[in-house]
């Protein structure tokens, strides 16, 4: 084995192109890759669960005993509601839908590594998009709440701190997206390397590592991402 | 053994990726300090355990960011190969 093949190893954790096509007039090979498939499956899963939950809840009578599924849905919704309420207080009603969607999407994306998908959040394109949504949410809410004072706040407490304040604003999406990407990607890389290392008939013990890298790390990062989004937005709209 | 220029660049990229991961020392120390203070806070006020735990985890996740910058550099050196020539 030469040095080249060792460094340039094409392990199972890289993004793979599944289907390549060209659009007439554009000199570029577009491709459907593993991220597209995984994000589609995750979205369809969330949608189907949401529709089933809605149908179930609509059918329920006040006198019925709640079943297993309804209990689970109620626990999830209540937990998300109290999480948003705890940080944002009386502004919680405006943001609880977006934050809950974000949380559920990130957590199911991170856990999807358990089911053999390549997690969509291990692609920088996805996490950067999520970070940019948070950035625009912060800026738009700041402008709506404070008007011109949103921009003059960049010159506080003294004018020559303007560049540092500006960098501070633009570091938000970068650090948010890199944190999520780095955590999920490091789990994916380590699991890929371990699966290359073990014999293909090994059954049980990589499961322990999955529990740490996918479940624990994934849940913590989903919590941190939605928590930081709420903190940044609440920073701009809170009453002084 | 003859090493071509291309192979030399790749070997140096691998060494650079290893050096970039020294960034992992800082978050390790920082998270340990945060966890230690979290433990002493729970010892002083066991009633506030859930609040302390969530604050500690949030702080640790933020402290981890610099280590992940090092990880991103290492991944780029190993797999994106910017110096391929």
Image: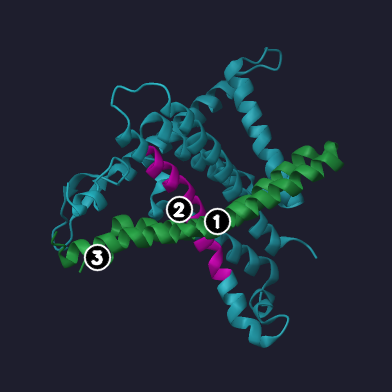
Dots 1, 3 in contact, CB < 8 A: no
Residue at 84% across, 37% down: B46
Q: Chain of mark 2?
A: A
Based on the displayed image, in which of its 4 quarters is residue A221 positioned?
Answer: top right
| Residue A187 seen in this snapshot | yes
Q: Quadrant of the C terminus of chain A?
A: bottom right
Chain identifier of the green chain: B
Check the rendered structure and report the hue given to chain A.
Answer: cyan
Q: Which mark is residue A71?
A: none
Element type where label 3 sits in the image: helix
Looking at the image, residue A72 sits to the left or right of residue A187; the answer is right
Element type where label 1 sits in the image: helix
Based on the displayed image, in which of its 4 quarters is residue B43 positioned?
Answer: top right
Q: Chain of mark 3?
A: B
Q: Chain of mark 1?
A: B
Q: Residues within 10 Å of mark 3 (few under 14, many from 20)?
A: some
Looking at the image, residue A183 sits to the left or right of residue A168; the answer is left
Same chain? Circles 2 and 1: no
Q: Which mark is residue A127?
A: 2
Reading the image, the residue beneath label 1 is: B25
Q: Which residues are magenta?
A: A169-191
Residue at 42% across, 29% down: A206
Q: Residues within 10 Å of mark 1 (few under 14, many from 20)?
A: few
Secondary structure mostly seen in the magenta stretch: helix
Q: Nearer the viewer, mark 2 or mark 1?
A: 1
Residue A229 on the magenta span: no
Residue A146 x/y as whole percent: 69, 70
Residue B35 lies, with reference to residue A200, above or below; the image says below
Reading the image, the residue beneath label 3 is: B9
Q: Distance of mark 2 from mark 1, alpha carbons?
A: 25 Å
| Residue A131 seen in this snapshot | no
Q: Nearer the viewer, mark 3 or mark 2?
A: 3
């Amino acid at each position: 084995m030469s040095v080249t093949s060792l460094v340039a190893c094409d392990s199972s954790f890289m993004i793979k192109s599944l289907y390549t096509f060209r659009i007439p007039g554009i000199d570029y090979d577009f491709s459907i890759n593993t991220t597209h498939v995984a994000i589609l499956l995750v979205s369809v899963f969330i949608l189907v669960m949401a529709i089933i939950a809605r149908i179930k809840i609509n059918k329920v009578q006040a006198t019925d005993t709640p079943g297993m599924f309804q209990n689970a849905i109620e626990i999830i919704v209540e937990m998300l509601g109290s999480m948003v309420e705890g940080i944002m207080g009386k502004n919680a009603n405006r943001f609880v839908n977006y934050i809950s969607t974000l949380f559920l999407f990130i957590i199911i994306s991170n856990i999807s590594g358990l089911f053999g998908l390549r997690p969509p959040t291990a692609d920088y394109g996805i996490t950067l998009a999520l970070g940019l949504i948070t950035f625009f949410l912060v800026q738009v809410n700041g402008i709506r709440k404070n008007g011109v004072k949103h921009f003059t706040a960049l010159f506080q407490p003294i004018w020559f701190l303007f560049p540092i304040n500006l960098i501070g604003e633009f570091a938000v999406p970068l650090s948010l997206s890199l944190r999520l990407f780095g955590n999920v990607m490091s789990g994916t890389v380590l699991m890929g390397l371990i699966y290359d290392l073990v014999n293909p008939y090994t059954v049980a013990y990589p499961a322990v590592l999955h529990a740490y890298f996918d479940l624990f790390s994934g849940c913590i990062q989903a919590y941190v991402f939605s928590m930081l989004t709420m903190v940044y937005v609440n920073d701009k709209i809170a009453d002084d | 053994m003859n090493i071509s220029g291309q192979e030399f660049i790749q070997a140096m990229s691998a060494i650079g990726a290893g050096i970039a991961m020294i960034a992992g020392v800082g978050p390790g120390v920082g998270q340990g300090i945060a966890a230690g203070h979290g433990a002493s806070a729970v010892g002083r006020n066991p009633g506030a355990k859930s609040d302390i735990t969530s604050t500690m985890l949030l702080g640790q996740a933020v402290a981890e960011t610099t280590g992940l910058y090092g990880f991103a550099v290492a991944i780029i050196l190993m797999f994106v190969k910017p110096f391929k020539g």
